[in-house]
Image: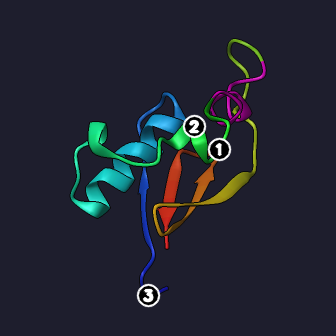
Amino acid sequence: MTGTKQRYGPPGRPSLRVLERIAEADGVDLVDMEPPLHDVVDTDALDRLFESTHQDGPIRRGSVSFRYREHDVTVHADGRVVLE
């Protein structure tokens, strides 16, 4: 798909991966990003959404999409962050 950028992120907080991808795409520093991501989406809920259901259990499946800084953002349970 033209205009789609995706990357698998390292394990960790999806909210941080979103910020890193947007900062890279927009050529800005993380600290200069406006509005703050937490003004657009509940970052705690986003991070909890894809947590393992128990210590050695599988990661939940699915995705969540939202608009942030002129990008359509989709965060997938497998770690992908897709910007369109």
Residue at point 51%, 52% (across, down):
80
How far apart, in angstroms, are the residues tagged by discs 1 and 2? 5 Å
How far apart, in angstroms, are the residues tagged by discs 1 and 3? 26 Å
Does residue 26 lie above or below 80 as drawn?
A: below
Q: Earlier in the sequence, mark 3 or mark 2?
A: 3
Secondary structure, mark 2, is: helix
Residue 30 in the image: x percent, y percent?
Answer: 29, 40
User: Does the CB distance between marks 1 and 2 fall below 8 Å?
Assistant: yes
How far apart, in angstroms, are the residues tagged by discs 3 and 2? 28 Å
- The residue range painted magenta reads 44-53
Mark nearer the viewer, 1 or 3: 1
Q: Which residue is mark 1?
A: 41
Q: Which residue is mark 3?
A: 2
Judge from the rendering whether residue 79 lies leftward or rightward of residue 42; answer left or right.
left
The label number, if any, that marks residue 18 in the structure image: none
Residue at point 22%, 44% (across, down):
29
Residue 64 in the image: x percent, y percent?
Answer: 70, 53
In this view of the protein, which residue sits in the foreground, 8 or 43? Answer: 43
Q: Which residue is mark 2?
A: 38
Residue at point 62%, 51% (across, down):
76
- Kindly identify the amino acid type of the residue bearing the numbered disc 2: His
